[in-house]
Amino acid sequence: DAKTTQPTSMDCAEGRAANLPCNHSTISGNEYVYWYRQIHSQGPQYIIHGLKNNETNEMASLIITEDRKSSTLILPHATLRDTAVYYCIVSPGSSNTGKLIFGQGTTLQVKP
Amino acid sequence: DVKVTQSSRYLVKRTGEKVFLECVQDMDHENMFWYRQDPGLGLRLIYFSYDVKMKEKGDIPEGYSVSREKKERFSLILESASTNQTSMYLCASSSRPSSGNTIYFGEGSWLTVV
């Protein structure tokens, strides 16, 4: 199963774009990349996911490199409410059991 | 909207007690999961289930058991609670993550064992 590596923490100015990187160099061809975030004492909230192509929704954009070994989550205009721990995870791919593998996450601090 | 509901938000139990944490999802999902989350350790998978009456051990199953008698309900059981099981417990569900479907989490259950 693929593992992910993320920076421990990042800062971002309010109103600026937040770019959160994730390394998943051992990802296999049919595994998806998911991004979640977690605000203190709450359950993780789904943000976005993708397989090969870049994805965008109302919350964020996901950029996946051509070799799929890394990805970047982009919050286009960060607000103070975006302060959270962001998790990049990969799905198991060949297995149908849906076992999830979480990394340590990146703590994003959005500053005024 | 998909909803994953954990029955208890905050619990305090005594050492040696049997503890039940209940989770219900309303989207007919096949897969359900139980995690625990501790500072500095991230989310760790305890057990998961991919069908009724089916279960698989995760990374840290010791001291826990699970029950899935109905598709929508997945229970985590601490047979004899210990202080090192004080943690936040998260339930999640999904249809088939390997085909790109979203995984949904509950709000978490904070368990303190004294």
Image (cartoon, rainbow, N blue to C red):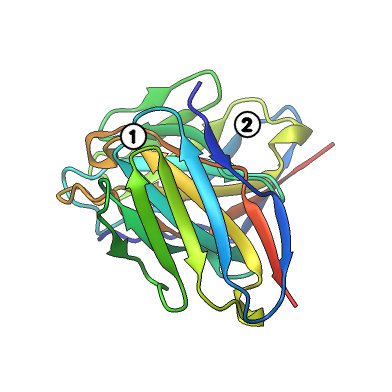
Residue shown at 62% from the left, 49% from the top: B108
Dot 2 falls on which chain? Answer: A
The residue identified by callout 1 is B29
Q: Are marks 2 and 1 on the same chain?
A: no
In three-dimensional space, the C-alpha distance between marks 2 and 1, rounded to whole angstroms, equals: 35 Å
Q: Is residue A70 above or below residue A16?
A: below
Please state the horizontal and vertical placement of residue A54, each as a whole percent of the image.
34, 28
- Say which residue appears at 42% left-offset and 49% top-offset: B74
Quadrant for the C terminus of chain B in the image: bottom right
* Corner quadrant of residue A4: bottom left
Q: Which type of secondary structure does the marked residue at label 1 adopt?
A: loop
- What residue is shown at x 47% (from left), y 27% (from top)? A61
Residue B53, image x, y percentages: 27, 52
Identity, as a three-letter code, of the amino acid under mark 2: Ala
Image position, residue B21 (x, y; %): 56, 56
User: Is B81 displayed left or right of A6 in the figure?
Assistant: right
Which is more toward the observer, A72 or B8? B8
Residue under label 2, please give it: A17
Q: At label 1, which amino acid type do we have?
A: His
Q: Residue furthest right?
A: A112
